[in-house]
Image (cartoon, rainbow, N blue to C red):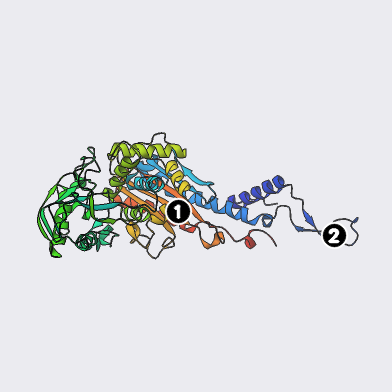
Amino acid sequence: MNLRPARPLAALLVAVAVALAVASGAAPAVARGADTDGPPAALTTPVFSLRRLPAVVARTVADSRLTTALDQVTSAGALGDAVDHTCLAVSDPAGRTVYARQADEPLIPASTLKLVTGAVALARIGGDAHLTTEVRAANGSVKGGTVTDLWLVGGGDPLLATAGFAADGGYDGQPKLSTPLEGLADRVVAAGIRTVQGRIVGDDSRYDDQRLVPTWLPRYIANFDVGPISALTVNEGLATFPPAPSYALSPANLAADVLTSLLRARGVAVGGTGVGAAPAGATTLVASIDSPPMAEVVGAILQHSDNMGAEMLVKELGVRFGGGGSTAAGLAVIRDHLTAMGAPLAGVATVDGSGLDRSDRLTCQLLQQVLAHEGEDSDLSRALPVAGRNGTLYKRFVGSAAAGKVRAKTGSLLGVAALTGFATETAAAGPGAGALRFSLLANELPTEAAGSALQDHVVDVLAAYPEAPPADAIGPK
């Protein structure tokens, strides 16, 4: 008799069927004749038939295939020296861990840190909240359309912009959601202001005057990755736009200059501009403009990986819930919120809210918990870029199985590639299957191309999940 070893998949299926049948106490179904005391007829459904629990077995097969595929993607052969500096975690909609590799290893997160910043901003400030920019005057100083000075008071809105900037100010020249400064100028005119005898003064005193995180690499400024952080920022602090961009040394002064230009274009005479905190007597609200809801503000920051916007959110958290409008105060609020969530913080370290700093450390386990806490139908999930559709993923995965199915925040620094978010299960999972949660952090990669390839391979595997034979093909009828 020629005996051959069972194939691995077949052996797995038989083992699962036996275990499930024994655990459930299932008895073999038999066909009997009219005489029930007679001998049993042949089994209609064999004890070891996988058709007894087809959905469970199909999912087990799918998990096995996903594990095999992701093991290959994250192997030493695929990643080289980065294999020991890579974490990957995948969970199903019920919270079951489908795959985990070094999930508790602290690694450089790059821009996936913005996902944590955004999640805490949504939770603490609220998705329906707005950030308000005001124009104030000294009490009783507005007379017959004339005022001595106006103060333009920043409220921490990172989307304050002119129409010319918003048209292509997003990632890779995409349009970007904005709070139109033109709208504020129109409201000043509508309030009856026709002459500003003195100055329009930019007030960014809501936050501290630390414009940059001290440990950031100088090239971040030179490469226009981030500009000076201020509570009063227009056009992300850019005094001139591409092809010859430049940052303003004083964001508040830039904002005052731009509003002055808009008012003059509307027939308002303005003497000059300046910078300074509005005095206690500047209690007359001439005009104001609200940002879009916080859910959309966070969406714009995550969609376009807006470093400055993320840093402004950190300081806003500090103003509202901490010791003031500083990075340190905001980061303390974020950590306290994560602690209250019960998030695993061993090895986690943050010195900014954007992920620019190379001393930031997150774990895949922490990112998984943040995603789970918010959920796939949350404002945070809706804020994420969609593969092949928009944001930082609008040119990625076009025409692939992942297009429209994967919503994720990217992360990229020298030697670092990251991706975390949700991947909708394939139609094979059945109606209402939900989405996988996944988190990938890879450090010490040799090239940027290696990081992109790793992201692509992981997403390809997730987009195919669950890959399993249909129930009718699993066992005999």
In the image: residue 292, left or right of residue 427: left
Q: Which mark is residue 417?
A: none
Say few, some or many: other residues with alpha carbon within 10 Å of mark 1 (under 14 / 14 to 19 / 20 or more). Answer: some
Where is residue 277? Give x, y as percent. 18, 44
Say few, some or many: other residues with alpha carbon within 10 Å of mark 2 (under 14 / 14 to 19 / 20 or more). Answer: some
Question: Callout 1, which amino acid?
Answer: Ser
Q: How many marks?
A: 2
Q: Calculate the distance from the C-alpha at mark 2 to the C-alpha at mark 1.
A: 54 Å
Task: Tell me if label 2 and label 1 are in contact, CB under 8 Å.
Answer: no
What residue is shown with label 1? 378
In the image: residue 418, left or right of residue 174: right
Where is residue 42? Give x, y as percent. 80, 58
Looking at the picture, tell me which residue is in the foreground, 467 or 219.
Answer: 219
In the image: residue 246, left or right of residue 169: left
- Residue 343 visible in the shown view: no
What residue is shown with label 2? 32
At x 42%, y 36%, the residue is 345
* Vertical relation: 213 (above or below) 385: above
Residue 165's quadrant in the figure?
Answer: bottom left
- Residue 31 visible in the shown view: yes
Q: Look at the numbered disc 2 and give the secondary structure of its residue.
A: loop
Q: Look at the numbered disc 1 and give the secondary structure of its residue.
A: loop
Where is residue 428? Give x, y as percent. 55, 61
At x 32%, y 45%, the residue is 110
2 vs 1, front mark: 1
Question: Callout 2, which amino acid?
Answer: Arg
In the image: residue 194, left or right of residue 460: left
Where is residue 111? Give x, y as percent. 32, 47
Q: Quadrant of the C terminus?
A: bottom right
At x 91%, y 59%, the residue is 35
Looking at the picture, tell me which residue is in the foreground, 159 or 72.
Answer: 159
Work out whether mark 2 precedes mark 1 in sequence or the reverse, and give the earlier one: 2
